[in-house]
Image: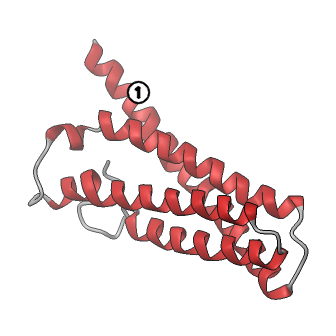
């Protein structure tokens, strides 16, 4: 009975993680566009700009929390496989490390931008940190075209 319950929890979390990634992607892109427009347009940093960056930060943290829980209940991780097993290594090490690094960059970028006093500097900081984090996230996603990885977690 416990096995089917943990399997159901795993499936719910996996789907939630999958859906939330699209929300994270959209929010990051909106925050990045806003940051570049403000940076190059030398605009005033408004509450709306701050909210875009903040919502991207919040949903990214939610995604990380779901991912950490998935890490400990995932049948792939539980099965083991060692570093020679590409699928296990991807989920246990590469995906996990890249996503944590991306969340750290978003968190630091938001915190540093918040403390800036010049509006253009706020936009520039947000743009740089969020773009680097997004690129790392995109590199760490199990894309469907990656044989053995896509959609399998």
Which sits in the foreground, 42 or 5? 42
Write the residue at 42% across / 44% down.
67
Q: Residues within 10 Å of mark 1 (few under 14, many from 20)?
A: few
Which sits in the foreground, 53 or 109? 109
**x, y percentage for residue 122?**
76, 71
Q: Is residue 47 left or right of residue 110?
A: right
Write the residue at 30% across / 20% down.
4
**x, y percentage for residue 93?**
26, 56
Instruction: Give the vertical position of 124 relative to 51 (above or below).
Output: below
Q: Is residue 105 left or right of residue 117?
A: left
| Residue farthest bottom in this picture | 40
Colour mode of the rendering: secondary structure
> In the picture, which quadrant includes the N terminus?
top left
**x, y percentage for residue 46?**
89, 64
Quadrant in the rendering for residue 142: bottom left
The residue indicated by pointer 1 is: 9
Quadrant in the rendering for residue 47: bottom right
Quadrant in the rendering for residue 74: top left
| Residue farthest top in this picture | 1
Q: Is residue 138 left or right of residue 46?
A: left
Instruction: Give the vertical position of 145 relative to 81 (above or below).
Output: below
* Numbered label tally: 1
Write the residue at 62% across / 48% down.
59
Write the residue at 25% across / 59% down.
90
**x, y percentage for residue 125?**
67, 73
Give SS at disc 1. helix
């Amino acid at each position: 009975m416990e096995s089917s319950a943990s399997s159901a929890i795993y499936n719910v979390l996996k789907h939630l993680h999958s859906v939330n990634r699209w929300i994270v992607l959209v929010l990051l892109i909106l925050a990045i566009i806003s940051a570049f427009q403000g940076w190059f347009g030398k605009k005033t940093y408004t509450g709306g700009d701050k909210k875009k960056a903040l919502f991207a930060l919040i949903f990214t943290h939610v995604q990380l929390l779901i991912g950490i829980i998935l890490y400990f209940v995932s049948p792939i991780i539980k099965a083991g496989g060692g570093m020679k097993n590409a699928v296990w290594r991807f989920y246990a090490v590469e995906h996990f490390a890249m996503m944590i690094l991306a969340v750290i960059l978003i968190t630091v970028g938001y915190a540093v931008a918040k403390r800036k006093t010049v509006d253009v500097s706020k936009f520039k900081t947000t743009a740089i940190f969020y773009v680097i984090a997004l690129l790392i996230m995109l590199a760490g996603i199990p894309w469907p075209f990656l044989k053995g990885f896509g959609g399998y977690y």
